[in-house]
Amino acid sequence: MENLIIGRTEESAILQRLLTSNQAELLAVYGRRRVGKTFLIRNYYAKSLQFYCSGQLGATQRQQLNNFREQLEAYFPQLQPFQTAESWQEAFSQLRQCLEKSKGKAKKVLFFDELPWLDSHKSGFLSAFSYFWNIYASQRNDLLLVICGSAASWIIKKVINNKGGLHNRITQRIRLLPFNLQETEAYLLSRHIKLTQYQLLQLYMAIGGIPHYLNAVERGKSVPQIIEQICFSKDGALANEFNNLYSALFASAEKHIEIIQALAGKNMGLTRTELLTESRQMTGGGLTTILEELTESGFVTKNQPYNKKKKDALYRLSDEYSFFYLRYMHGKTVREQGQWLAQSNTTQYRSWCGYAFENVCFKHIHQIKKALGIAGIYTEQSSWTTSGNEFYEGAQIDLLIVRSDQSINICEIKFSEHPFKIDKKYAEALQKKILAFKQSTNSKSNTILTFVSTYGLANNSYNEQLVDAEVRMESLFSS
């Protein structure tokens, strides 16, 4: 069934290795809502799945145990009837009795989905699950247990970093991220939807690489029409996704949304201190927890600015849909037909595209490095800014690739409909920016002015004189 899976090359290799190992395995899979965790596991392990159950959001312990009984009946029909267990300890005892009847040496996969919902308050689920693994499952080299959840912070805290019965018991983890551009293109092509790479970029900047979101894309429509339909029509798939997205993942979603809103207003990102100022009602410890949860769930990325201390680390909103929603959808109580089609032709939208394209580039550093021929060199990525002084003007750099070979790629990122033209005024600004960087940082590294753009640069004397390297849009779609 692997042929149903688009992309996920590294993850598939891990899943195959676990399936053929000669020991019991406990795999934790986590990632944000709608990213395709359940689809990946159920399809890759379709032929080996011996038991599957899923938590139900907001259900009582009795309801969860009823669901567990129904799954036992579905996967072990020859052993019916089953009684609904009175506790999770009893439920896992029933599962153990069923597995004792299973013959053959091939790996048998047990998949427990949405684990945070199963482990409701005082349910005893995690304790019972730990006991089941430690006393029974870990002793059978033909068992592979997979646990999964959208609440990444819960999985990290309660399972991977568990101090009790599951301490150091996880044998493998997979943090499932959204599709990159190549996977997004392949997914849409699998549904016979053909868009140019420029159009795919526009779509990606609005909704990201979430498979469930991409599933709402209809064939035969332009990108503005697609966005109009799924984001701005009253029944659009993403019209009301924002609040549902965060409330399904976090118990106190209002505070998480507050941080997301603050980050959406600052393209370069905000430091922890700045975020505390933005949210005066939040304590330092509370903010630390929220930032960890948002980072692990893939909504926020943490970046260390060049030549700055750890306390100056910048948190940046990296979720495309949230960024797009807060800029163009939030607060729009009336959504008229054709609203986005008109908005997508404005200079304001084109300006926003520049910032959104920067986010895409940060996510595709591997592809940029590959295009530059430095994939094998250790690098660190960051942004940089200076307020200037009497010797040099203030400046900022979109992306710095700091390399271990004493070189730094100073990257300018440009999203445009045509080859970007460097004129005299911009050429002078570039020279001043590079000078400010060298003087401000006292860097002794070789600086390489690099342009990352959609259609490359228009050839002229300024281009030939200043630009050392180019990366074009098609390179971002590589593996």
Image: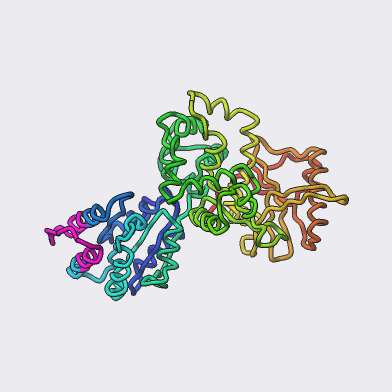
Corner quadrant of residue 2: bottom left
Q: Residue at x 41, y 64 (%)?
A: 158
Q: Which residues are magenta?
A: 69-96
213 or 30, nearer to the observer:
30
In this figure, what is the number of numbered marks?
A: 0
Q: Would you place residue 59 above or below residue 309 in this image?
A: above
Q: How is the image coloured?
A: rainbow
Q: Quadrant of the N terminus?
A: bottom left
Corner quadrant of residue 98: bottom left
Q: Residue furthest top?
A: 337
Q: Is residue 476 visible?
A: no
Q: Residue furthest right?
A: 390
Q: Is residue 315 magenta?
A: no
Residue 141, x across and y down, in percent: 30, 74
In the image, is 146 to the left or to the right of 464? left
Q: Residue at x 27, y 57 (%)?
A: 52
Secondary structure character of the magenta stretch overall: helix
Q: Residue at x 32, y 61 (%)?
A: 122
Q: Residue furthest front?
A: 281
Residue 430, x across and y down, in percent: 79, 46
43 or 175, nearer to the observer:
175
Q: Is residue 72 magenta?
A: yes
Q: Is residue 365 visible?
A: yes
58 or 405, nearer to the observer:
58
Q: Would you place residue 299 above or below residue 204 in this image?
A: below
22 or 124, nearer to the observer:
124
Corner quadrant of residue 143: bottom left
Residue 407, x across and y down, in percent: 73, 61
